[in-house]
Amino acid sequence: MVTSIIGHMARCTAPVEGHRTASGAAACPACRGRYGGYSSYGSYSPPSPSYSSSGSSAVGRSGGGGSGRSVKPRWSRPTSSVLYTPAEVLALTPVRERVEKQASLDLRDVFLCHAWDDRQGAAKDLHDLLVSLDVKVWFSEKDVGLGVPLLRTIDKGLANSRIGVVLVTPALLRRLPQESIADRELSALLAGERLIPIVHDTTYEALREVSPMLASRSGLSTIEEPMANVAAKLAELVAL
């Protein structure tokens, strides 16, 4: 079990309880109030992200856990109206650093991992929102042609995308125990600092019952803010 030594040797709750949304890290006794010491199942310890405070409420801010402040991360453009909680900046900073390291490579911005049942519903909605924001998305509905080997195409899509977004829905929770293609995608995405869970129409508690490791990764939630706001944050994250 991974621990984080902060203050009075507090133990990080992520491996057991998860951090729910990104804001959940702020409620962890080991992680709250310290943005350089967060530890999950990975070994990465991001440096303190730089951001500017923007007051206690604003459009685009994700509600939730442990902080009333709204901030803008260093990668936001000056004209952007999208605001984040400090815990969200913490969770997204290592992913942003990976994006910046790959700036010179010709890659898709986002690999969208989703349950097959969501391909014409929530997954398509998120895809369309991202495309409207000029994000290049790998999406099975348009990138897997008839007669093309599916697993080979997925492997290629993962290798040629900067980050992975996992749309966690009730349908995905049903599929994961069956060791489906979605589980194969998740295994590859969990191997690096490029995974962002998006919880939609379910909870992190339900996810933790199926995949404790995935639930330990901080992400975003449409319970706390509209899908359009989530898409705006993803678009900023991959913008170069």
Image (cartoon, rainbow, N blue to C red):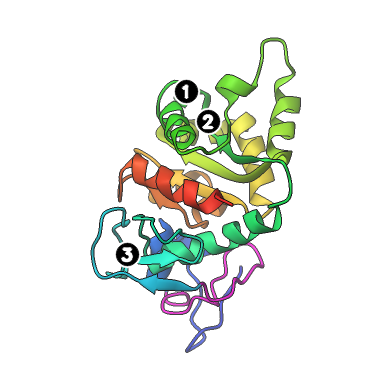
Q: Residue 73: in sight, yes or no?
A: yes
Q: Which mark is residue 175?
A: 2
Mark in the foreground, 2 or 1? 1
Disc 3 secondary structure class: loop
Q: Mark 3 points at which residue?
A: 65
The answer to whether residue 41 is above or below residue 30 is: above
The residue lying furthest to the front in this view is 79
Q: Mark 1 points at which residue?
A: 117
Q: Which of marks 2 and 3 is nearer the N terminus?
A: 3
Residue at 48% from the left image edge and 81% from the top image edge: 10
Q: Which image quadrant is residue 43 in?
A: bottom right
Image spot of residue 225 (x, y percent) = 30, 48
Which amino acid type is marked by label 1? Asp
| Residue contact between numbered discs 2 and 1, judged by CB atoms under 8 Å | yes
Q: Does the magenta stretch include residue 38?
A: yes
Range of the magenta residues?
Answer: 29-49
